[in-house]
Amino acid sequence: MLPPGSSVITAPQSAHKTATRTFILGTDRFGRDFLSRVVAGSGLSLAVGFVAVLLSLLIGVPLGAFAGYLGGRFDAAVTWLLQVMWSIPTLLLVLAITLAFGKGFQQVFLAIGLSMWVEVARVVRGQTIALRNIEWVEAGRVLGLSTPRIVLGHILPNLASPIAVLASANFAAAILIEAGLSFMGVGAQIPMPSWGNLIRDHYGAILTGHAHLALIPGACIVSLVLSFNALSNAMARQASRVAAS
């Protein structure tokens, strides 16, 4: 259930109102219900994480799988590309992509997704190399199965666990990167609420007796990132137990 206040409409007469039955977390300097803006910001963070992870999987999984299976010049070219992309710091790469496509909501999705496929491709490539000479893959080649059918139908299903672990970790990273971009002013733009721009707009309020306006979105970011990291670690441990059994 959404709180009763608006996350966008301003009401100057209600600026910096303390917590009441109507405004549970009070209002910001423009009189906007702060709880509504925090809730709306959570939707943006989850959407960025989902789209960025989906985009990174769509690029990284097939590229890494076919590079690992085919080998040769194609693998060498993909490996060179991965090394080049890997040498660029993630935040710097995201900033470059964001500035190239312009500031905005859609650009954040694209920038973060295009910065995360490298790790996905690297992990999938390594796992595929370990599986490409196993007995059931050799049997598929002997039976005349096509390369796409072997890779997509037989190798990738066996990589579901490491891919899921990586996707969960990347989800947490995407949320953190989006918050950083919004804090620097190149992510979600006003009046769209984002946890990052909520911190940017209100970090000065710490000195004026309204510290909760900056601390609450910061705590939300930390909680969500730690939750997905814990999920990733739990999935990794479960995958290790299954592999050992």
Image (cartoon, rainbow, N blue to C red):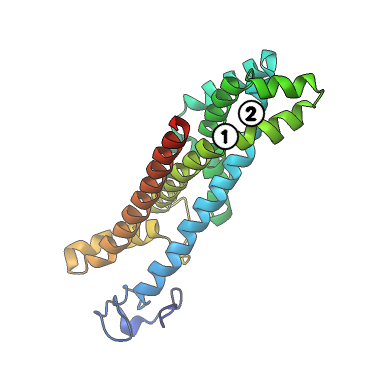
**Dot 2 crowding, Cα within 10 Å, few <14, some 14–19, many 20+:** many
Where residue 129 sits in the image (x, y, percent)? 59, 20
Q: Is mark 1 on a helix, strand or loop?
A: helix
What residue appears at the point 37 percent right and 45 percent down from the top-left corner? 229
User: Could you tell me if residue 2 is visible in this image?
Assistant: yes
Residue 5, image x and y in percent?
41, 81
Q: What's the amino acid at mark 1?
A: Leu
Q: Which residue is drawn at 43% across and 43% down?
A: 235
Q: Observer-nearest residue: 138 or 94?
A: 138
* Type of amino acid at the residue the image marks with label 2: Ala
Front position in the image: 38 or 9: 38
Viewed as shown, does residue 36 lie left or right of 48? left
Query: Residue 26: x and y, percent?
Result: 29, 77
Where in the figure is residue 183, as x and y percent of width and height? Answer: 38, 52
| Mark before the other along the chain sequence, 1 or 2 | 2
Residue at 38 percent of width and 67 percent of height: 38
Q: Do the residues labelled 1 and 2 touch (CB within 8 Å)?
A: yes
Check the image and report above or below for 97 versus 41: above
Dot 2: what SS? helix
Please identify the quadrant where the C terminus is shown.
top left
Residue sitting at 61 percent across and 28 percent down? 64
Task: Tell me the quarter of the picture where residue 63 sits.
Answer: top right
Residue 233, compared with residue 74, is above or below; it is: below
Tell me the number on the disc at residue 159: 1
Residue pointed to by mark 2:
65
